Image (cartoon, helix red, strand yellow):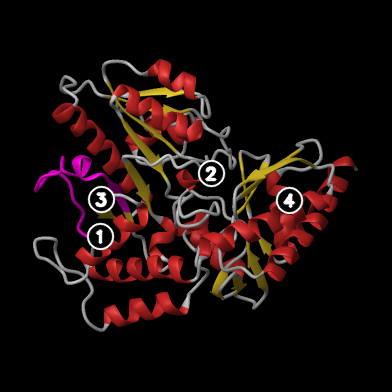
Amino acid sequence: MDGQHIIDRERLFGAQNYAPLPVVLSHGRGAQLFDVAGKRYIDMMSAYSAASFGHLHPRLVKAARDQLERLDIVSRAFHSDNLGAFCQELAEFCGLDACLVMNTGAEAVETAIKAARRYAYDELAIPPDTAEIIVAHGNFHGRTTTIVGFSDDPNARRGFGPFAPGFAHVPFGDAGAAERAVNPSTAAILVEPIQGEGGVIVPPRGYLSDLRRICDRHGILLIFDEVQSGFGRTGRDFAWMHEDARPDGVTVGKALGGGILPVSAFVARRALMNVFTPGSHGSTFGGNPLAAAVGREAIALMREEELSARSARLGAVLMEAIEALRSPAVIAARGRGLWVGVELDPALARGKDVCLALLRRGVLAKETHETVLRLAPPLVIEESELLEAIGALGAALEETAAARTG
């Protein structure tokens, strides 16, 4: 079946909650993907960081296969032989004490919200059902009804209310505004260290450490959502490490599953994790033996292949190559490590048009908010592949600008 027939069938029988580019991918290795016709593409998106280790990393595939020879899933009514080791290795990698393993990033964030609220009532003496969590404008933490309720993206919210109360919004990057929002009902501050869906928005230097000081001063929790920014994406193991702003809790996911399967977790100080008691939270698949096996191998790969350092080095190459394009269609490029947002001049280039032009040149990327091109290749990408992709970006920008100016 050719690509168009596959696309048509998906449209006929699937929900239209995504607007994919017109390409049907069938296989891949490392930072390269191939469509059903055999055309090669460089992956500059890595599934929003889920494929940070590249596609079908042999060590991750082996870890999954070896585990599948022994045991797939058991109920959390019983112990399994690798969950404890996974939790220890993940907690130590995050610089915290304990883990609650889930599946998706949104589940990890929901877990963090529940933990912050119960901690507020049990430890901060906040009256029941009144706890408030400070969040940032432009946030993206997932798509559950609670989470979209504190989003300010109208498309994510429309038609899904009523929404849960208990969230206060402040401008991202403004620590002073965050402190002014603290009140006797405040339980926590929950932010992304870098806003990915918002357009790879990097806050002012000192913002994260300022938030840490604010939370210490007021005796409230600091929780970072590192589902996209974690596991080396920004050139450090976690984005908060750029400022040594150790949180009380952190949400992780995407790369943790190695691109093999969904694995996420809420990782926290022991005092915060202790709010959970039997029956208070859980997931049928959360912490299953297969997930634990893949997650452990992902952590080992991060350490042994020094992927955070690789991300920092190649991130500098990526930024330098973008700046060298000197394209009038580019207003600015921003980011850290192998995570860059290219802000486009809408008079010269629309994000979707640039992505389509890149697609024709064998590069996969995605825009956000129409005017920002997000670049987040696998951390294992070769420098030659990276430079090839940016060369294609230069040609795509020229083509798009020429078409828009007539």
Residue at left offset 36%, top offset 40%: 247
**Which mark, residue 87?**
1
Q: Which residue is mark 3?
A: 97
- Please tell me which residue is depicted at 31% across the width and 22% down the height of the picture: 218
Where does the magenta region start and end? 265-286
Judge depth for marks 4 and 3 and give the one in front. Answer: 3
Query: Of the residues under marks 4 and 3, which one precedes in the sequence?
Result: 3
* Total numbered badges shown on the rendered structure: 4
Residue bearing the label numbered 4: 354
Q: Which one is nearer the viewer's eye here, 119 or 258? A: 119
**Residue at 55% from the left image edge and 74% from the top image edge:** 28
Q: Secondary structure at mark 3?
A: loop
Magenta stretch: helix, strand or loop mostly: loop
Residue 62 vs residue 39, the one in the foreground: 62
Is residue 322 toward the left or the right of residue 138 in the image?
Answer: right
Of the residues shown, which amino acid type is indicated by label 4? Val
Q: Does 267 lie within the magenta span?
A: yes
